[in-house]
Amino acid sequence: MQKHEQKFCVFFLCVCHRLMMIIMIKTSGNQKTLNRHGGWRLLEYKNVFICIYLCVVCLLQYKGMANLHIFEDWCGTSIAQLRKNLHYPLYPHNRTTVKKLAVSPSWTNYGLRIFGYIHPYTDGDFLFAVASDDNSEFWLSDDENPDNLKLRAYVGKTGREWTAPGEYGKYASQISDLIPLQKNNKYFFELIHKQNDKGTDHVEVAWRLKQIGNGFSIIDSKFISLYTNESSLKAADVNHIPQTIASHVTPLQRSSQTPPHGVDMLRADPRDSFHQVPLLDRARLLGVLPDCIYNPSYSIKGYPLMRYQGLQFVHLTYVYPNDYTRLTHMENDNKCFYHGNPYYLERIRKKREDRDLNNKFQQMDQDNQPKEIQKPPGEPQNHPEEPQQQPRKKKKRRRPEQNLQDQHYLQNPPSEVKNYDLGKEKDSQRFQNNIMEKIPDQKNPGPAQREDRSRSKVKQQAVEDDNNIIKHENVAHHLQITQHQHQNSSNKASVIAAPSNEEYNSRWGHVNDVRKEKEIQDNAIHIEEVEDGGNEEDSWVNQGFSEEEDYDLTNRVVYDVEVKWCQTFQAKPLDLHALRSDWIDLKCNVSGNLLLEESEALSVVEALMKKLNKKYPRQFSLERIVNIEKKPDYNRGSRYLLELELLEASGRHLRLVQYIYVKRTEDWGSHKKQNAQGEELKLCNPYSFYWNPTATVHFIIPVKNQARWVQQFISDMEEIYRTTGDQNFNVIITDYESTDMNVEQALQNSYLPRYQYLRLSGNFERSAGLQAGIDLITDDHSIVFLCDLHIHFPPGFIDTVRKHCVERHMAFAPIVMRLNCGATPLEPDGYWEVNGFGLLGIYKSDLDSIGGMNTKEFTDRWGGEDWELLDRILQGGLEVERLYLRNFFHHFHSKRGMWNRQMLRNT
């Protein structure tokens, strides 16, 4: 209960006490006075009863419940992962109450924060215990003050730990030390829980007195109360939410050193802060280069396009130096950069004229070629001319303790992913009142099916565990030999159908249908054993003899393949960027920007500096090249955006940001050819193609009932304003009657230099909401940025939009990185949204000239309106700059609870 609410209830108590005192004084006279004032006395007593009733209601409304905050759409298993959530702890998806400290929503990928007061039922020393799947923490204060919280018990820190319901003794950290409590006091507590998408979700807190024979019991409604009543508050009202040592707002902190996540894109780059350097006035660059007509050949103004065909006419941009937008840490999920499937191999074949990439990449040194493996005596051969195969690997026999482990797996079949990734042997129904013994099937895979699925992954790696170390090649080799040797033996063939060992049959025979690969491997091994007296060796297995003991007893000769550790090879430099083209590959979402060759970049800069020093002798020197972007036009020339840091003679640092054009002449067909001939590059200013560094950028966002995201967006815009001091931007929010917050009031309370608010009625329509915001703009020479609500912006984003929007010539569609579930801007696991054009910057005059948003076709749906708009932009004669943008992220979210979606009640 908050302090002002406590004071409210105390006020009622004081009023009641005052009324009782007045009654006692008034009625202390003789009987006549009592009779004469009888009516008055009844009125006074009535007021006292009403006062007492209100006071009791005021106090009891907090009893028997605790505050429950839910954070959905967040992957991970640890509490540390929950604390990385953008909205934790102030803006949960839902705020409700719980009647006991034992919760199991039967949901996935969420976090819980439960807080309130605990009321001890007696004086004494208490022990608290917590159990959960997955991690959890129980915090308890020394009194009712949240500032005195202490961590008392927890389940795990790494995310690998979990328990069954009521299992309080699995980890030493689950049970607290003795805590002295008093019956007449209340104690603030906080329970935090994180659940991923596996297992049975639950969290519970129990307590017991330090007395012999007392057991743990869950803390129920009789001993808890609310911290505050949130039933009448909106989602944007957060001042009442306690920020404690366990749960508080933590700002993002970037390090200039190598980030813990290890992604090169997070390293400090001059591009990130270059907007802070004073800009060299464009007027001082007049006359440095001659003007030239800019009319690129790839412009398709007036060209008839089919619906959504414009995507084929958008090309990528080359950059220098490397901005490390290639998502190297995500290439296990998408290996398109290495062209590992036939789709890319065919393109490489055409591009490199049937040259073999692998042969060019690696060649073994001739003087270190491995010699032919010596043929072991008696090694079976399928054909004398076939290459020598490696000796067969003998399968390790199961020991008795391994048999018990297998039986445990049958009784408690683990889930597919969690068993391999986190080492948990649990499934979605293991926590019933009695543990079920369940035979593996298609819905509940056993160990063999998990091996089958694991083997089907990209690299076809060998699955290694304690019971089986066999590769696909070895299995196939076993089968070849087995079939060749036993094709005429009916007795031994029967061993394949039914192994002779009865214990093996009783344990494994009833799951043959769902363990086919395991059956093949086991039968292949059994055939080997039958050749040497299988029944006898099976008895050895049951007696627990190891593989090494088998070798000693049978005196078999075993051969190991010699490894040529001194083998060397030759490798030619491999530039995978050189194999790429500037067309948009919708199947590759990890590649990043194309890289411009260093020689070309330096030659263009050198040519510009010569022209600059010719007009201003000894006035400017090149400090460093911050960024160069190239848009090639192979028919007419190439356009460059140069961003250079210059040092003026006065010692002042300036930034030069200028578009230049290198025309293609009849004498040479490419920049390389011209440069090779030693000719001077012919640079010019593309006529009327320049960016406006003071243009106002209007961010337009339509919203409906997205309080936590609206508040986060406003905070991000405030942070950009504080960082850059740039006042030439405007936030426009069109609101479809949001009920979870007062959007207009939030804008009024913000530190934004400019904003506009428009309230709309009806169902949410993205196109109509964007167009309504566009109509509020009166300056046609300002930039409209069609924005999304879930975006994390880099600090210099406003300046980036200005640089890439050129009135009457070019719009800007930056490529955003979509974060995976549980990923953050400091741990950016995800992929580039290569096919989305919903984030778009364009001058209002250009947008009006093509008709604005399509509000007729895209009314009750969204998705596709960005490609339709792209078609019209290209047909209008504009080009679209497409660039992978550093630190430009789209936060993960599901569509649950968004826009016009309704809740289906769980009955």
Image (spheres, grey):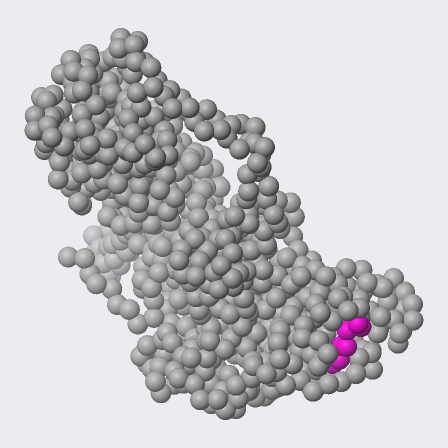
Image side of residue 321 versus residue 385, left or right: right
Query: Is residue 116 highlighted in magenta?
Result: no
Q: For residue 50, what is the image quadrant?
A: bottom left
Q: Is residue 208 above or below residue 713?
A: above
Name the spot of residue 79 as percent of width and height, x first. 41, 42
Q: Residue furthest top?
A: 553
Is 227 on the left-hand or right-hand side of 584? Answer: left
Q: Position of residue 367 (x, y in %)?
A: 59, 32
Which part of the image, by quadrant, shows the C terminus? Answer: bottom left
Residue depicted at x 56% and y 81%: 298
Q: Residue 885 appears in which quarter of the rendering?
A: bottom right
- Work out whether residue 164 or residue 347 is closer to the camera in this orientation and state it: 347
Q: Position of residue 281 (x, y in %)?
A: 78, 76
Boundaries of the magenta span: 679-685
For the question of whether residue 184 can be seen, the reply is no
Who's the residue at 48% across and 64% down the image? 350
Indicate yes or no whether the magenta region holds residue 680: yes
User: In this rendering, is residue 100 above or below 640?
Assistant: above
Q: Give the tally of numbered discs.
A: 0
- Please report the residue visible at 42 percent of the width from the left and 35 percent of the height from the top: 157
Residue 47 in the image, given as x and y percentages of width and height: 26, 59
